[in-house]
Amino acid sequence: MLPAILLALACAAPAEASPLTYVSDLLTEPLGSDPSAPSSPAEHTITFTLAHAIPASGSIVITPQDGAFSIPAGFDYTDADFAVWDGSAYVNRTLAAVPSATDDGVSVVTGSSGSLTLTLSSGAGLAADSKVEVLLGTNASFGATSTQSITNPSAEGSYRIGIQTFDASSVLLDDGTAMIAVVKPVSLVLSPLNTAPTRFNGFPSGTIAANNSVVELSLQTDGPATCRYSTTPNTPYDSMADQFAPSLGTLFTSVVSGLQNGTAYVYYVRCKSLQGAINADDFLISFQLDVTPISNTSVTQSGGVFGSGPYQNGSQNLYLAGLTISGIAAPQSSVTILQDGSQAAVTQSDAGGNFKVALPSLERGTYTFAVYATTNGVKSSFYTATLSIETATNNTLSNIMLPPTVSLQNDSVGLGDSVVILGRTVPGATSTVTINPSGTTAGAPQTYIATSSGSGTWQVTLAPGALGQGTYTITAHTVLGTLQSNESAPAYLGVGQTPGAHPKSGADLNGDGRVNLVDFSILLTAWGTSNPLDDLNGDGTVNLADFSIMLFNWTG
C-alpha cells in the first residue's frame, strides 16, 4: 500500500488564471426562430464579472465550442454590442473594426471553429470586478443594427461557450465557461377539459442494488401536468408536500435521499392537468434496496471473532462499504482505477469527458487510490487520494480532473525546425504548457497557453528557432472553471540531438535541478515496472523504496 503522504504530494500547482464569476449566456429569438432549436440562429446575451482588471489594449476572447456553432461569413463589429455596468445600467462602449484610442476593436473568425475577439481601446481598460455584457446577433443595435446571428449546433445536447481575458501582452488573466442547451422545439397538446392525467413508467421498481442511499424517482404523463407525491396513501393532491420537477411537463423526476439497505419504500403520486383536473387515486412507485453484503473477514475463526465495530441486525459479520469515483478526462478515454497499486476497475469517459466508477464491496481500512486516463495510446499522470473507510458507509471521490496527456509530433528536431506539441484533455479547458531546459541545456523555462477543442485536443506550435540545441522536458496542467489538474506526465524533446534517456541526478528524474511533483509524476507512471531510468535503488522494481529515496531528496 502506498503511504498517505501521496495525496499531499499529488496536489496540483496553483492555476495561472482566475475564474470569471456569474458567467451566463442567454439565448433569445431572432426573426421568429426558436433560439434553442438545433441549427437555428440565436441571439446571445453573454454576461460575466471579471476577477482581474483588463488593461488598455487588453482583450476578451469568446470561443463557441469547436465544430458545434457556426459564425456566418460577414459577421463583424456591427453584429456585436459591448457594455459595462455603471451601478444602475449597462453602458455601451463604441465598437469598430480595429481598436483606437477611443474605440474597442472587434475581430471575428467565422465558420464552425470560430471565435470573436474584443480588443480594448488604448485609452480605456476595465477595472477588476467589472460586470460585462456582450450581445452577439440581431439583438445588437448600438451604433448599427445587426442583420445576422450565430447558428446553433445541429445536434441536441449541452454546449460550451468559452470566455477568456488577456492583458496587452496576451497573458491569460481570467477564464470561464457558459453552458447552453440545444433541444428540439416543444409544442403543447392540451388534454380534453376535466380529464385527469394518465400516469405511467414509474421508476425505480423491484429490488435495486444496496448502498444506493440517493435515488431518482421518475414517471410520465400523457399530457402537460404537475405532479406531487407523498409517503402516506390517500393524501389529497393539495396536501402533498413534495413536488416533482419540472413544475409543468410530461416527464417528471425527484431525488430522494437517506435510503437504507434492506428497506422497502413506497411513494404515492397524484397529478394535476393543465386544465385543473386531478387524479382521484394514487399511482405507486415502489422499490426496495437490497441488503448490504457481509464481510468475509470478520467471521468466527479459531481463537474468536475477529474485528470490531457495529454488528448490525444481530449479524456476526461486519458490513462492507462502497466508494464512488467520478470526474472528467479527455473524451472517450480509457480510465483506470488502481487500489493500493492493483487495478480495481476500468471504464471509459463519455463524449463530454465525464466518467464514474463504483467500487461497492470494500472492507473497512485505509486505501490509496490512483486514477489515470489513456487516450490515443498515451497515458496521463495520476490523480491520487488516500482514504480511511469505515464499515457500512458510502464514500465519494468527485470533481476529479485528470491531467492532460502531452506528446510530440517529433521527439527530435533539427536546429531551426518548428516544434509541434500535442495533447488531449477536457473539452473547452485551458492548458498551461511548460518547456524546461534539462540537464546542462541553457535557457529559461517557457510557458504557452492552449485551449482544447470540443473533442479535447489542443496543440502548441513553436516557431523555428524558438529553442536552442539541447534536451527539454515538456509538461502541462489544465484548468476548467474552478477545477484544475495535476501536472502531466512529461514528454522529452531533443533539439539538434536525440533526447535519449532523460537526464537525472539521483531522484531528479527530469533533470531540472529540483525534486518535486514533476519527478513524482514520472515515478508514479513507472510504478511497479522495472524501468531502469526510474528505479532509484536499482533493485529491479519501481516501488516504495524508490519513493522513500525521492522523499529524502525532496526540494519542492
Image (spheres, rainbow, N blue to C red):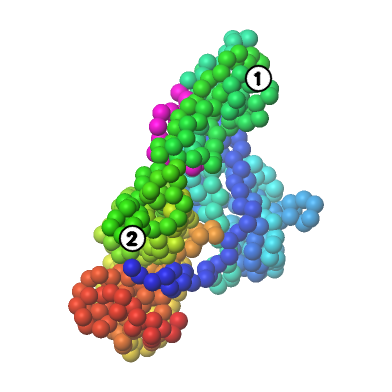
Q: Is residue 231 visible?
A: yes
Tell me residue 92's x, y (percent). Answer: 72, 53
Q: Is residue 422 visible?
A: no
Say which residue label 1 marks. 236
Q: Quadrant of the C terminus?
A: bottom left
**Is 169 placed above or below 513 here?**
above
Say which residue label 2 marks. 339
Tell me residue 411's x, y (percent). Answer: 26, 73
Tell me residue 226's x, y (percent). Answer: 61, 24
Q: Is residue 211 magenta?
A: yes
**Is 155 placed above or below 302 here?**
above
| Amino acid on which the number 2 mark rests in the picture | Gln
Circle 1 Cα neighbour tier, 10 Å, few/some/many (<14 / 14–19 / ≥20): some
| Amino acid on which the number 1 mark rests in the picture | Pro
Q: CA distance from mark 2 to mark 1?
A: 51 Å
Circle 2 Cα neighbour tier, 10 Å, few/some/many (<14 / 14–19 / ≥20): some
Q: Quarter of the image holding residue 17?
A: bottom right
Q: Which residue corresponds to the image point at 56% horizontal and 32% vertical from the top-left?
A: 34
Give the total number of marks visible in the rendering.
2
Assign a secondary structure to mark 2: strand
Numbered mark located on residue 403 in the image:
none
Q: Which residue corresponds to the image point at 30% horizontal and 64% vertical from the top-left?
A: 341
Q: Are marks 2 and 1 in contact (CB under 8 Å)?
A: no
Q: Nearer the viewer, residue 282 or 55?
A: 282
Bounds of the magenta segment: 201-214
